[in-house]
Image (cartoon, rainbow, N blue to C red):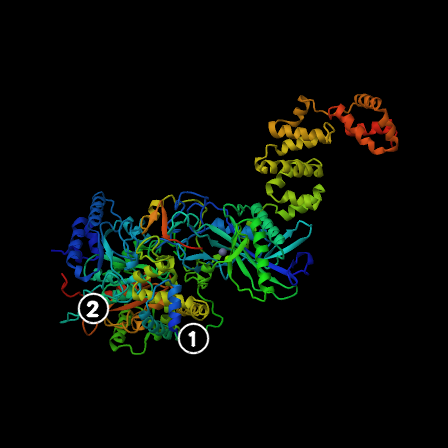
Amino acid sequence: MSVDATTVRRIAHLARIAVSEDEVAPLQGELNAILAFVEQLGAVDVTGIEPMTSVTPMAMKKRRDVVTDGAKADAIVANAPETEDHYFLVPKVVE
Amino acid sequence: MTILNELTLAEARDGLKAKAFSAADLTQAHLSAMEKARGLNAYLVETPERALAMAKAADAKIAAGEARPLEGIPLGIKDLFCTDGVATTAGSKILEGFTPAYESAVTANLWRDGAVMLGKLNLDEFAMGSSNETSAYGDVVSPWRRPNSETRLVPGGSSGGSAAAVAAHLCLGATATDTGGSIRQPAAFTGTVGIKPTYGRCSRWGTVAYASSLDQAGPIARTVRDCAILLGSMAGEDARDTTCADLPVPDFEAAVARGVKGLTIGIPKEYRVEGMSAEIQALWDTGAAMLKDAGATIREISLPHTPYALPAYYIVAPAEASSNLARYDGVRYGLRVPGKDIASLYENTRAAGFGREVKRRIMIGTYVLSAGYYDAYYVRAQKIRTLIKRDFEQAYAAGIDAILTPATPSAAFGIGEKGSGDPVEMYLQDVFTITVNMAGLPGISVPAGLDAQGLPLGLQLIGRPFDEETLFAAAQVIEEAAGRTKLPAAWWA
Amino acid sequence: MTAAVNPKKLIKGGLHDWEVVIGMEIHAQVTSRSKLFSGASTEFGGEPNDHVSLVDAAMPGMLPVINEECVAQAVRTGLGLKAQINHRSVFDRKNYFYPDLPQGYQISQFKDPIVGEGEVLVDLPDGESITVGIERLHLEQDAGKSLHDQNPTQSFVDLNRSGVALMEIVSRPDLRSSEEARAYVTKLRTILRYLGTCDGDMEKGSLRADVNVSVRKPGDPLGTRCEIKNVNSIRFIGQAIETEARRQIAIIEDGGTISQETRLFDPGKGETRSMRSKEEAHDYRYFPDPDLLPLEFDQAYVDALAEGLPELPDAKKARFIAAYGLSPYDAGVLIAERASADYFEAVATGRDGKAAANWVINELFGRLNKEGKTIETSPVSAVQLGGIVDLIGEGVISGKIAKDLFEVVWSEGGDPRALVESRGMRQVTDTGAIEAAVDDIIAKNPDKVAQAKEKPTLLGWFVGQTMKATGGKANPAAVNALLKAKLGIE
Ligand SMILES: [Mg+2]
Ligand SMILES: [Zn+2]
């Protein structure tokens, strides 16, 4: 499988990365080189094989239901580019 | 006179304990060396004040007879580990200005044991790279050079800053991370020792994620023993990481002297890849002979799905990365490039904040997870992972204790030499190391000789899950037989 | 589950009748102290970003760790829905960009949910009942909240809700009218509240519905559906369905076709409108979250949770009908809230069940409604109401006096029996006293006495007069018997 320019733009948008027109062709070439490389996986017979979900077989650790965190809005917004009254600010979102 | 920063970590520890020198002196020796070595671009941030304060505290502990396992040992920290109050960038512009208010589990373990932080080490952006050329903060230059050549060589990647700093005596050891070979390949390129422990041995909490199911922290140091000491402090259970194993940390240092008598070492025939240089083949044979001489049995084995590990990796890792890196959106921390609406804010921020390789991997990952392609790519790659892991399980079940392979296909190359046209050329760097991540196994890279140009080469040992001890024992045999690689004179100072 | 088409439920179009087909996805907030994957509080409200951990804010290197109570709550709910409990389930990431989704993905369950197929028995007001199939229930994270009205050019993002555990409960398209849909949500809410797994507080957003609506001619295959997102009251669910069904019918009857899309119900304007923004990129790229292992437990774990479950509404209703002789309607009203059922049972135990139900439903509920109070804040306790019922049963007071007594207890409190004594409300059963009053009335109204022989319905007038004369305290049965004898009415 290989990607065309339209697909490159669609993926870039899905990934929320602005791509200028002159970046499309080189990106397309690079992505297709990678896709051509992974194409060889088609040769493997994977019938009846379970996809790996966790590399180490162990039971998932769980938390007790207690409040152990929070009450640190200062720290939460400390690194934010734009804040007001402990809110994060973003350009207006129209719903 | 002893040059303090050229001691091994174990020697420095013993010297401190014997009060031969102070932690403050040891730290100062490193800070001075770092200052002179800025041309290598190994450190992104130096933290001299913090380092000296920690050293002073260590000296007090030593004086009081309360020295902890790493008391006063100066270390460099890969800038993928979040450090409380110290800028953390992951080598990316997108984290510009980000200062965490928390300390990664691994570094917190080191400080708990008395270690001293010298600063944050350069790396490939988000640990994506094999040459440290993708860092937004410039290439790291290897302290190694070819004889009579001023060509600047790569230290390997992504833990290139860690490997270069350890090799150039800019710290006694460093933290590193390995998703596809990012500890073992730079260790091999710089004549240092690096171990990627079993997945789940070290907590991932507080370490910037690249590919969650593959990422593992580990140390790079100048000797096998030093690595064992460091891993003993870095590892350990953590309730905050669901994938971190609830297992006691063995005495890794004690395992170093175990030897390999009675062990069976596997030589996987599939690693004899097409076009492998005679030099690498010879190194591999020599390594096997060293282990045999020390009492191990050498047996050829087959790991049939080896050729598929690298392509499967370039589906699984980018897929996870595309999702893990979605949080860098210019809203809560790091870079923000304004836009006319929220979507263009995201797009502008991520276009300006991520480098070329990171964008490439995010886009490949986005593509292989997208509707209509998920099963053909991602699910198939995860099935192949199952097969890769099964290959190893079968070898271990048949009595193999550890597996010996080359660490890299070649010695270090020049900056700018590889991967500019076809990204896959660079990806092939990890052909020997990547299976280990895909199967979650431990792997160690140990220097085993020099190539014809006088550059270091490494061998890799792969172990059973949670059996790093055998790797330390076997690597020690190779280190002793091969002799420690000697770095050329400090041309950078 | 598709029963025969019920003509009463069809919607009349301009050309012919239409059947509306409804399926629902309910998001129910799990009752827990801390969030699904972090230790921050789930408490409603709070200062902006105050119930937020580093995990909820998706700081670099942060990892999710699951809250065991949220898992237990999902299993309890699955048991309450008589559903398949999956001993192995998987958490997936649903990837999309939105300012209130800090990770850039929602941790949810896609292919392998914790709970599989189940069912809900729904009673309709006309006495009919339907079974609604449950397709699945899965655990997922709630998003944060964006405020759009603080500033003309910016939205304000608060992550207090980010990461709170939700159960998404998906029904089959088994509902055929807005009334059925409302009854279904009401019943589901009742079950969740009984289980204690969701408080069902729709005003606080603890229960939200995504409603899938399509229309078809009876007997036709399913039509194209539209999903109305985030409807947050039972009344609005009904209105949204009616509005959307009529919109679709109008389009089809006009020769148009329905395009599958996400819509929003605007209760103010009484219309649904397209949410184009949500349509844009519908490629969520689900994949198993590599930070989390599969969620696994054994049957013993499920059995232990089953053991701890309370009696559920259907069982309670059946028991109320059998044990107290209630009508299905009354039993249904009483079990709608666990607190009401408990109250009723406290009143009914050791007494006449029907009388207790009567008093609880008619007097108490009526009064609570009027005053905007709930059973929890009722000024009349079950013990007090039981006391009143006892006094009636013993013939100490009449039903009418009982209502006065109820008023006194409601506003002043106190022990009903003591109140009857201290306020002289005891019913007069002394035949002599009643007879004197009767004789007096007969003597004063000879013309009515004469008429009564022809017109026995006048008896009521005499009863009324007697009661009035005795201050309402006369035993009505005794009055009746005496009057009949003296007036010669059979
Ligand atoms: Mg939904
Ligand atoms: Zn949902």
- In the displayed structure, C303 sits above or below C46; it is below
* Residue at 42% across, 55% down: A94
Q: Does mark 2 have its CB less than 8 Å from ligand 2? A: no
Q: Nearer the viewer, residue C184 or B46?
A: C184
Instruction: Say which element carries label 2.
Output: loop
Q: Position of residue B267 (x, y in %)?
A: 33, 72
Marking on residue B153: 2
**How many residues crowd mark 1 within 10 Å: few (<14), some (14–19), many (20+)?**
few
Question: In this figure, which residue is indicated by the disc labeled 1?
Answer: A42
Place residue B294 in its image quadrant: bottom left
* Residue at 30% across, 66% down: B356
Task: Please identify the quadrant where the N terminus of chain B is shown.
Answer: bottom left
The count of marks equals 2
- In the displayed structure, B184 sits above or below B269; it is above
Residue C293 seen in this snapshot: yes
Q: Nearer the viewer, residue B472 or A24?
A: A24
The chain identifier of the residue carrying mark 1 reads A
